[in-house]
Image: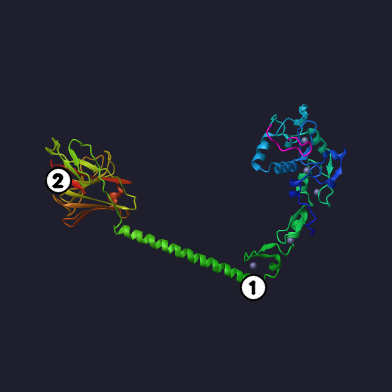
Amino acid sequence: MQTESSNLLNPLELLKSSGIPKHLLYQSKIEVDHLICPICLNILWKPVACGQDKCFQSYCEVCINKWIQDQAGDVVLQESLYSQSLIVAPDSGSGSQYSSQSSSFSEMPQQIHVETTLPNCPKCKRPFKKTSIPIIHNLLDSIQLSCIYEECTTKPGYEQFQKHILQCPFRRINCSGCGLQQLQNELEQHENQCEQVTIECSKCFNKMSRKLFQIHSIDDCVQQQFNNKDNQIAQLYKKIEELNQKNQQLEQKICKMLKGDSFDTIHQFSFKTMFTQNYQFTGNQAIEAKLIRPSFNLQKQKNDFLHFYINHKIKTQAVQGIIWRMRIQTLKGNLLIGICSTLCHYSIDFIINKLGEIKRKEWNENKYKLLRKGNFTFSEGDTLTFQFMPLQQCLRITNENRHIVCRFEPTEIIEMGDSFFSFFSLENQGDSLIFI
Ligand SMILES: [Zn+2]
Ligand SMILES: [Zn+2]
Ligand SMILES: [Zn+2]
Ligand SMILES: [Zn+2]
Ligand SMILES: [Zn+2]
C-alpha cells in the first residue's frame, strides 16, 4: 500500500515546532480554550508559563523559546537566560502536586530571581520569568487525543501521545528501494516485493535491484563469478609480489649477516676486575690495560693469572654480530684469552693460551682441562680481532699479523647460555694490552 506523502504530518517534526493541532483533540471534560498556546494557537505541548503576578500565561516550550530567541537575537544571551530565569511557581505551596508530576517538571521550580533584562512575555509585556503551573499539566493529562494517522483508532492520552505516534502501526516509513512512504506494519511486505529494493545474489554476490535480479541470468551470474575470481587472483598475485619483495630484502639481510659484513663495533670499552690493586686502565679512545702488580702464588711457586673482563654482555641470541680489537702491547709472561658465562664464580670458562691450547673449566672444578691444540699463537706486537657471529654461534679470533684464526665452536657458545663476557688474564708485571 502506497500513500501520498504530501498531506502527512511527520511525527518527528510535529512536536518540534508547535503544539498539538486542535483537530487532534478527541475528548476533553474541560474547556480546552485554557490549554491553547497563544503563539501557535495549538494545544499546549510541554507548557511553560510566565511567572509574573496576575499573568501566568502558559506557552508551548518550543513556542516561547523561539519567541525569546527572536527577541534576544543572541544565542549566548539566551543560554544565560535559561540558566537564570527559573523561579518558584506561584502555587508551589502544595508540594505534593509537584512530586506527582512527570519527569518533565522535575527540573522546574528553583528560587532564583534575576533582575537582568529579560525578553518580555508576549501577553503581559513584563520580563518573562519561566515557571511551571501544575494545574495546567493536570488538565492536559485529562484530555484524550486522536492519532495523527487517520486509519488509527487508538486514542492516546496527552502523556502517551508522542510515544504513540512514534510507534503507531500506521506510521509511515520510507521504503529502502523506491523511497515511497509505507505503513510501518506493511513495510516488510512491501520491501519483499518492491522492484527497487537492493538484492544481493547469493552466488555471485553482485548487488542489484530486484527488477534487475529478476532478469539476472545464469550466464550473467557465471560471468560475474568469473570476474570475482579474476579479481581475487589479481589480488593474490599482488600479494605474492609484495611477499617476494620482502623475502628478497630479508635474504639480502641474512646473507650480509652470514658473510659477517654486519657487525656492531665495540668502541667504548669499560672493564671490570676484582684485582683493582693490580690492574691499571688508562686512555680514552684506546684503553691500555696493564698489570702493574703481580700476585705470587705460594702453592705454585709462581705468579698467578689475574683476570679482567670487558664489561660488555654479548648476547648469543642476537642477530647483529659484534666485533672488537686488541693489540698486545707488552707480553713477557703468558696471556689467557677467554670467555665466561657470567661474571660470578659459578661460571663456565673457555680459554686460549699462547701455546694455541683451548681449555675448559667448570665452576666446581679447579683446573682447566685441555680440549684441543691448534696452531693459533700470539705474542707481543700482534693485533687480534674478535668477531662474534650469533647466527653461526661462533666466536672467531684472528691474529692479523700472522693470518691465523682460532674459533670457539657453536657447542662451546651454547654452553654460555643467553650471553657471555670476554676476559683476559695477565701474569707478568708490566705486561699490557691495548683495546682499540
Ligand atoms: Zn505553541
Ligand atoms: Zn506574562
Ligand atoms: Zn496511531
Ligand atoms: Zn518500495
Ligand atoms: Zn548472480
Question: Helix, strand, or loop for circle 2?
Answer: loop
Between 85 and 279, the one nearer to me in the picture: 85
Q: Which quadrant does the N terminus fall into?
A: bottom right
Marks 1, 2: nearer the viewer: 1
Q: Position of residue 436 (x, y in %)?
A: 21, 49
Q: Position of residue 58 (x, y in %)?
A: 78, 37
Q: Is the stretch drawn in magenta largely helix, strand or loop?
A: loop
Residue type highlighted by circle 2: Asn
Q: Which residue is mark 2?
A: 334
Residue 120's tag is: none
Question: Helix, strand, or loop for circle 1?
Answer: helix
Between 315 and 102, the one nearer to me in the picture: 102
Name the image quarter holding residue 243: bottom left
Q: Earlier in the sequence, mark 1 or mark 2?
A: 1
> Can you say whether 388 is above or below 44 in the image?
below
CA–CA distance between discs 1 and 2? Answer: 90 Å
User: Is any part of residue 423 visible from this angle?
Assistant: yes
212 on left or right of 247: right
Q: Residue at x 76, y 32 (%)?
A: 52
Name the image quarter holding residue 431: top left
Q: Residue at x 32, y 57 (%)?
A: 257
Q: Which residue is mark 1?
A: 219
Q: Is residue 134 magenta?
A: no
Name the image quarter holding residue 280: top left
Magenta segment boundaries in residue numbering: 115-127
Circle 1 Cα neighbour tier, 10 Å, few/some/many (<14 / 14–19 / ≥20): few
User: Is any part of residue 417 visible from this angle?
Assistant: no
Q: Position of residue 358 (x, y in %)?
A: 20, 49
> Can you say whether 262 is above or below 269 in the image?
below
